[in-house]
Amino acid sequence: NKVGKGVGGKLSNMIREMSTNSAISFQRSSLTKPARHVLIMDEVDGMSGGDRGGVADLIQTIKNSKVPIICICNDKYSQKLKSLRNHTIELDFAKPTAAMITKRLRMICQGEGLQMNDATMNAVIQNANGGDIRLILGTLQMIRRRTDHLSYDDAKGAANTKDVEISPFLAAQNVLSDATYSFSDRLDFCFQDMDLVPLLVQENYLNHN
């Protein structure tokens, strides 16, 4: 349909249509209470030179939108967003503390049947660049595939052997490599960047020698 692809196949037109149209839903209670929608624009501070006019077009979309628009960025003080900030309500989100992450990890580990004490959890957090949630969850998933218990010494030992700074391109190359990497090692490479590494493997595995 037109909303799914946008007029002329352009993403900007698709966004404009989604923000200025009301959707009809036939789900339960939709006849008395219309479904509510929200449009999320992620990494708006990452607009490059190829997105010329992107911020201006986004501002115009915000002015005409009939649905809430959430713009997410890492650096709201970027010069690219100077004009956009005049048309938004700014909400700052602080990085979660180690105590907050530990509390959530305890719940996750309990639900997944993984046993570790708070000292071990803190070691896992520190290994993940001091609190990278996605990396922590990936690490816990790998650990649970191997065992139902993790000791403090094992957690610290993993920190000494794992290179968390490896690039996703090298990680994908290692996954496809004929080198004697174990299955666990290849899983570690995948979790270096769970968004990009699987895509790189999919793109290259047929032609890899």
Image (cartoon, helix red, strand yellow):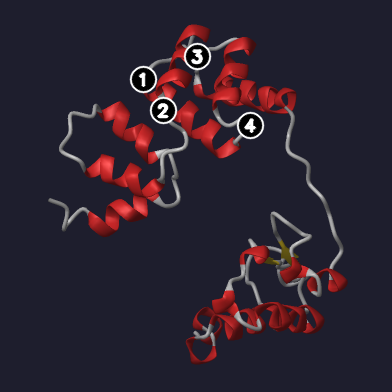
Q: Secondary structure at mark 1?
A: helix
Q: Does residue 15 sit above or below 159 in this rendering?
A: below
Q: Secondary structure at mark 3?
A: helix
Judge left or right: residue 49 versus residue 94.
Answer: left
- Compare marks 4 and 2 and give the one earlier in the sequence: 4
Numbered tag placed on residue 146 in the rendering: 1
Residue ID for mark 3:
156
Q: Does residue 144 sit above or below 94 in this rendering?
A: above
Could you tell me residue 87's position as x and y percent?
A: 85, 73
Numbered tag placed on residue 142 in the rendering: 2
Judge left or right: residue 178 versus residue 115.
Answer: left
Q: Residues within 10 Å of mark 3 (few under 14, many from 20)?
A: some
Judge left or right: residue 123 versus residue 172.
Answer: right
Work out which residue is located at the far bottom of the displayed protein and give it.
8
Q: Name which quarter of the figure residue 141 lies in.
A: top left
Going 48% across and 7% down the picture, which residue do you hit?
A: 153
Whether tag 2 and tag 1 are in contact, CB under 8 A, the answer is yes
Q: CA distance from mark 4 to mark 3?
A: 15 Å
Whether tag 2 and tag 3 are in contact, CB under 8 A, the answer is no
**In-front residue for pair 41/179:** 179
Please, what is the three-letter code of the amino acid marked with disc 3? Answer: Lys
- Compare marks 2 and 3 and give the one earlier in the sequence: 2
Q: Does residue 99 sit above or below 79 in this rendering?
A: above
Could you tell me residue 18's position as x and y percent?
A: 65, 79
Viewer-side label of 4, 2: 4
Q: Name which quarter of the figure residue 77 lies in.
A: bottom right
Q: Residues within 10 Å of mark 4 (few under 14, many from 20)?
A: some
Numbered tag placed on residue 131 in the rendering: 4
**In-front residue for pair 69/131:** 131
Viewer-side label of 2, 3: 3
Going 54% across and 78% down the picture, which residue do you hit?
A: 50
